[in-house]
Image (cartoon, coloured by chain):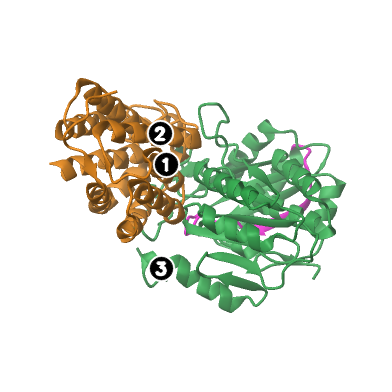
Chain colours: A orange, B green
Amino acid sequence: MGTVTSTDLTIDQLADWLRRFAGIVEQNKSYLTDLDSAIGDADHGANMARGTAAVVSHLDEANTVDALLKKAGMTLVSTVGGTSGPLYGTLLMKMGMATGNVTQLSTAEFARAFRAGLDGLIARGKTELGDKTMVDALAPALDALDASVADGAQWPDAAAAAAAAAAAGRDATTPLIARKGRASYLGERSIGHMDPGAASSTYLFDALVEVLG
Amino acid sequence: MKKLINDPENVIADALKGIAASDKDVRVDFDNRVIYRAAPKADGKVAIISGGGSGHEPLHGGFVGVGMLDAACAGAVFTSPTPDQMLAATTTVDTGAGVLHIVKNYTGDVMNFEMAAELAADAGIEVSTVVVADDVAVQDSLYTAGRRGVGATVLLEKIVGAAAEEGSDLAAVTAVAQQVADNSRSMGMALTSCTVPSAGKPTFDLPEDEMEIGIGIHGEPGRHREPIADAHSIAEQLVAPILADLDFTGAPVIAMLNGMGGTPLIELYLMYGEVIELLEAAGVTVERNLVGNYITSLDMAGCSLTLLRADDDLLRLWDAPVRTAGLRWGL
């Protein structure tokens, strides 16, 4: 167990987290689509912008953290489609199922819930680290968050460390050969391009930094 | 981008309006973006649904009707539909005999249909699934998402639709589906990229004097690009990898020369002439064929070839009556 921090995330902050995630996705819509044009099918930005905007429209409906995250996940599943819908949706739904009926999360509780979400995403995508997917950004970010929790770090620093690890993981997808998703059809031609899902995944942690900053 | 659209964000909704207006044999659920037969199938017959990203028309919505699909779920352009769309379709078309899901092998489609099948099972509906993965341009290995589902989907939807119409049970219909999936191979090429409406520009740049070999149906780049060649050489590049992958001699073959959406029919017929010459020289007997735009990639110029190693039973199911916007004979 990590040290309980004095900076728990309230349900309002978690809603703000999802709102800011949607905002960063919207700002980077064209960038994500450009990344996807190179090795995918040129729709990641548009799909994620549509899905996260739908999430924002439902944020006021939940009174507990689990309801908030589950609703957000289900909204992504039913509005995004493609690969990103089930993966981002499963991440947030499983995260919600792991938090329980609460109105705030400590750093350790947030990290534990996120781990449950990531496990669900990996099971749904049958993905491993190094396949050139979202997992390559999310897994190191969560490892960094866990390390911060173990060290007893407070929220702003823990989020910044996770965001930095996510960015490093995202950048490390560029030289990889894609083994999952449409990019895998390109074989070696996928080398030299950043994975669009890894790129959008880092926005989850950038948004967390914004909320806590 | 020059397209006949109102707003890139409303392409699917606006197109569904036109589909509903043009075909009185189908009914459109605009909320769920599902195209149904206007007259549901008789009780006790297996129902068949498919679906996928839009932009491949007439696939899948144009194949809803007697002798083919009971429903088709329309996703955003090149994006799989969602589990709730598929669940709505599955629940609506089930007559009590179970529902077959026809899924093209793309990570998103497989995942969304998987979630829908889990939800349908929870609701007490028997669902079986066939995954189409016929594209020989993709190496099938542990290190890729597997082969893409392309042209074989058209042949499969026709043949399996006939099997369900005859009254075969879910296990038998699924077995026919698997037989078609296992015995089909495809290869495609592009002369130009396509332009996804929401992206507003071509997905990839292809110089005037180059072509892309081994493309899929989503404007994703192919295995390699090379200088443009004459139709005869292009036909060789489509036929050779298919014949290298599966023996098509000694059985009746169904062949489809498919346009990607931006190539005129005269070129497709020309290509079919080249292809059939090569196939005959290789000892392959084509008993049935389709030439035209059946599984497209928006405005991409190019074509694909699909071969199915059939048998007498599959030919009989192929010849059975069908009445859809995209395929129609015997009715």
- Relative to the observer, which residue lies in front, A73 or A60? A60
Residue B147 x, y percent position in the rendering: 57, 37
Nearer mark to the viewer, of 1 and 3 = 1
Q: Answer above or below: position of B303 versus B144.
A: below
Residue B311 x, y percent position in the rendering: 84, 44
Q: Within the magenta stretch, is there residue A70?
A: no
Q: Secondary structure at mark 2?
A: helix
Q: Answer above or below: position of A201 versus B92.
A: above
- Relative to the observer, which residue lies in front, B189 or B91? B91
Q: Quadrant of residue B131?
A: top right
**Alpha carbon of mark 2 to alpha carbon of mark 1: how far?**
8 Å
Res. B205 visible in picture = no
Q: Quadrant of the N terminus of chain B?
A: bottom left
Crowd band around label 3 with a 10 angstrom C-alpha radius: few (<14), some (14–19), many (20+): few
Residue A97, which numbered label? Answer: 1
Residue B17 x, y percent position in the rendering: 51, 74
- Relative to the observer, which residue lies in front, B9 or B88? B88
Residue receiving disc 2: A116
Residue receiving disc 3: B10
Q: Quadrant of the C terminus of chain B?
A: bottom right
Left or right of A36, for residue B117: right
Q: Quadrant of residue B197?
A: bottom left
Dots 2, 1 in contact, CB < 8 A: yes
Q: Residue at coordinates 33% horizontally, 35% vertically from top-left?
A: A193
Q: Which span of residues is magenta-colored?
A: B282-301
**Alpha carbon of mark 2 to alpha carbon of mark 3: how far?**
36 Å
Left or right of B296, for residue A199: left
